[in-house]
Image (spheres, rainbow, N blue to C red):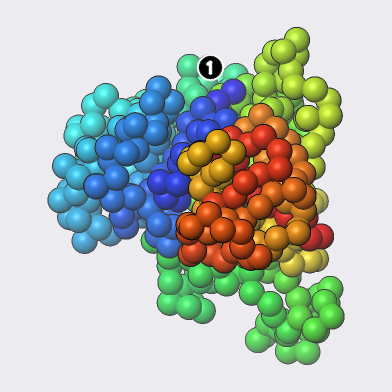
Amino acid sequence: MELLSPAGNLEKLRYAYLYGADAAYIGVKDFSLRVKADNFHADEAAAIRAIKGRRRLYCALNIYFHKDDLARLSGELDYIAEYPFDAFIVSDLGIAALVRKRFPQAALHLSTQANCTNAQAARVYQELGFSRVILGREVGLDEIAAIKAENPSLEIEAFVHGAMCLAYSGRCFLSAWMAGRSGNQGRCAHACRWNYRVLEEAQRQGEYFPVAEHGGGFTTILSSRDLCMIDHLAELKAAGLDAVKIEGRMKSLYYTAVVTRAYRKHLDALENPAAAPSAEELAACREDLFRVSHREYCTGFYFGRGGVQRPTEAEYQEHHVFLGIIGRELSPGVYEMDIRNQIRSGWTLEYIGPDISSAGDGGYTLLGEDGQPLEKADHGHAVRIRPGIPVEPGYIVRQARG
């Protein structure tokens, strides 16, 4: 199965591939359902081509297009053509013919936003020229098997990790109503994640939804749990899934790397048990999914609706803080460091990499540009580090705080 990871900017794209993604998906300008992601610009096309190499890259053009949107898209096709896209993720059939005509070598993938949930619909989309269908998140495991069995030449993709939506296939008006930002146009304010104190329907005054209160007296009754299928990849493969997808173009580089790595290791173990990572490494990578920032996990709709229909009962859970990235080696044993959160001398740091689950270091030295030792380093400052153990450029630095 192909492992498909999110990339909200150039840096995240690099780390998606570095930590094991077979393919990545990105948005461009204003035509993606994650407008608030950094997204990409034409002057980055050459850098993206170099980062991509022989791996695959998909473009999310998955908003619902109004007349003005179509006009803008038509004017941007030359700009989009600068990117090395292998496929376009589309939800609006109105642009499918436009994309196919302008980019005949690229594949068409049906967005999950189109909520394809049965074999007959999948067949129609294939007849319209789609080579892959990203199923609606409401589809169960047995339904995936039936869809694939009836459409064996159609690639089937599904989300396996990340945020779930309160509304059916993300078709939600809550953000537009409460914040004036349409989720169907890529501007979702995530109003379902906000904290609420009272929930009463106007025609049933005095009747309240049952809520589980937090210490402050508020509830997250509208906030869905996160999806996590790391323990069920074999079932997904048996059902005929061709690609597994991670949600999170607006999430951090650290999230992209940790989640991609966990699924990469477990997919490798599934595909080639003889060359699988050790049981200890697999367990450590899996455990990191519970240490990265997330809501309570569930298995979505794959095994029924029980878990996903209950809201999360806790706020974001996070056990490690992302501190920075190891850069190039400037001199023997001294590396550039891209600081993301404050680091102080004397802390115990952890390094993670594509092929190391975690390595502790309490013997490092922080250095300024002049080579002198520092007691602390803050985000935005030019800092160097002399690690106390061997590291490589691209390693992520974090600290356990949970």
Whether residue 136 can be seen here: no
Q: Relative to 112, is 314 above or below? A: below
Closer to the camera, 310 or 14?
Answer: 14
Residue lying at the far bottom of the rendered structure: 206
Which residue type carries mark 1?
Pro
Q: Residue at 48% across / 64% down in the picture?
A: 380
Q: Where is residue 134 in the image (x, y as percent from the top left)?
A: 51, 36
The x and y percentages for residue 249 are 50, 51
Q: Is residue 83 left or right of residue 289?
A: left
- Residues 94 and 79: in front is 79
In the displayed structure, 310 sits above or below 259; it is below
Q: Quadrant of the C terminus?
A: bottom right
The answer to whether 35 appears left or right of 301 in the picture is left
Position of 95 relative to 338 (above/below): above
Q: In this view, does 279 lie to the left or right of 76?
A: right
**Residue 245 appears left or right of 328:** right
Please tell me how many numbered marks the rendered image carries.
Answer: 1
Q: Quadrant of residue 268?
A: top right
Q: Name the residue rendered at 76%, 59% in the picture.
A: 346
Residue closest to the eye, 219 or 5: 5
Which residue position is annotated with label 1?
152
Percent of width and height locating residue 74 = 17, 48
Q: Nearer the viewer, residue 308 or 220?
A: 220
Q: Which residue is drawn at 22% across and 37% down?
A: 81
